[in-house]
Image (cartoon, helix red, strand yellow):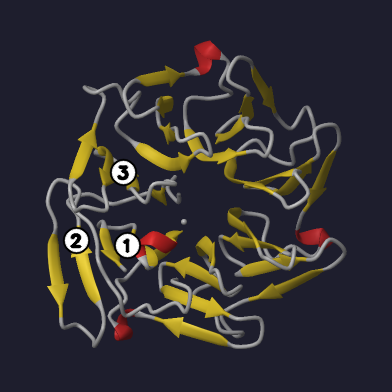
Amino acid sequence: MAHKHGIYTLLIAVLVLLVLAGCMAAQGLYPGWAAYQAAHKLTGVVFDRAGNLWAGGPGGAVVWHPDGTHSQYTQVDGLVNDSVWAVLAAPDGTIWFGTSGGVARFDGKSWQGYTKEDGLADDQVWAVAAAPDGSVWFGTNHGASRFDGTTWQSYTSANGLIDNVVHSILAGPDGAIWFGTRGGVSRFDGTNWQGFSEADGLADNDVWSMAAAPDGTLWFGTKGGGVARYDGKSWKNFSVECGLADKLVESIVVDPDGSLWFGSEAGAARFDGKDWQTYTQAEALAKNTQIVAWHPGWQGLALHWAAAGRLLR
């Protein structure tokens, strides 16, 4: 199971990017675009607060620095497992990796690994997210886990989680934690659980991505129903007919100008609240593109081709 993140005026023509054990740039595909192909597919990409670009995949983890240098990490260096599915740059500067063998934490110097033996719900970790209180949440094949730096606590359907397979996690504007699962969406405020499914208006029960927009609305990317928007009271769904590139939405990024970008296997789509614009392979956007990261210091969106590690920026 695999699925798993603009500049101020979103000049998508400004492109740079990546290598993962070697890359090859292909320019001239379309005016303003350039593609960079890595040796492995990429399943997690994120910028840290210093502007370093971190990525994960089946070959471990790699970081590119603003000066153009890069470093690669595998189990030999301390990564708990080389199959990386999610990457988090935490507010405290640490980098977290969700893998097929547990969770790894890197503070810039040393590594720390955590598995089921430590309290993690399951060693297959699909999602990692930071909460406002400083804790870190993990979505696994058998529930969600919270780690406050000392203690682990896990939650499953027995506690109120709508489904145990957790694909994505989001800290909402009000501090509540949202979980995108195979069976719908769950909201947890620290005490009470609330679940949402197709019966409530959700586009599709299998939720792969989530994002909070500046206006307070929450957006949910699904496996087969497109995107759902929730304003706290009602749901509105958007699919290919509305302007999405594909009904399977694997990633969502909020641009500083308030618009939203949706990554899918058929390309990317941008929605400014009124109009949709789609970018596909015809515009030199790599096939199977997911929008996975943004950082103002790099002046652009990082887009990645999950199938073969190609990136655009």
Helix, strand or loop under label 1: strand
Q: Which residue is mark 1?
A: 305
Q: Secondary structure at mark 3?
A: strand
Q: Quarter-wise, where is residue 287 in the image? A: bottom left
In the image, 132 versus 72, the foreground residue is: 132
- The image quarter in which residue 266 lies: bottom left
User: In the rendered view of the protein, which quadrant contains the N terminus?
Assistant: top left
Q: CA distance from mark 1 to mark 3?
A: 12 Å
Query: Looking at the image, is mark 3 or mark 2 earlier in the sequence?
Result: 2
The quadrant of the picture occupied by the C terminus is bottom left
In the image, taking residue 6 as reference, residue 16 lies left or right, namely left
Residue at 44% x, 60% y is: 294
Give the class, few, some or many, for how many residues have Cα within 10 Å of label 1's Cα (few <14, many ≥20): many
The amino acid beneath tag 2 is Gln
The earlier-in-sequence mark between 1 and 3 is: 3
Judged left or right of residue 303, residue 208 is right
**What kind of element bears circle 2?**
strand
Locate residue 119, reporting x and y percent.
58, 15
The label number, if any, that marks residue 250 in the structure image: none
From the viewer's side, name the closer residue of 69 and 229.
Answer: 69
Q: Left of 133 or right of it: where is 29?
A: left
Q: Nearer the viewer, residue 10 or 242?
A: 10
Q: Residue at x 87, y 64 (%)?
A: 233
Which residue is identified by label 2?
A: 37
**Residues under labels 3 and 2: Cα distance?**
13 Å
Residue at 73%, 68% in the rendered image = 215
Binning the other alpha carbons within 10 Å of mark 3 as few (below 14), some (14 to 19) or many (20 upward) gives many
- How far apart are the two marked residues, 2 and 1, measured between alpha carbons? 9 Å
Residue type at mark 1: give it.
Answer: Trp
**Along the horizontal axis of the image, is 272 left or right of 174?**
left
Location of mark 3 (residue): 57
Expressed as whole percent of the image width and height from the top left, the position of residue 140 reads 55, 33
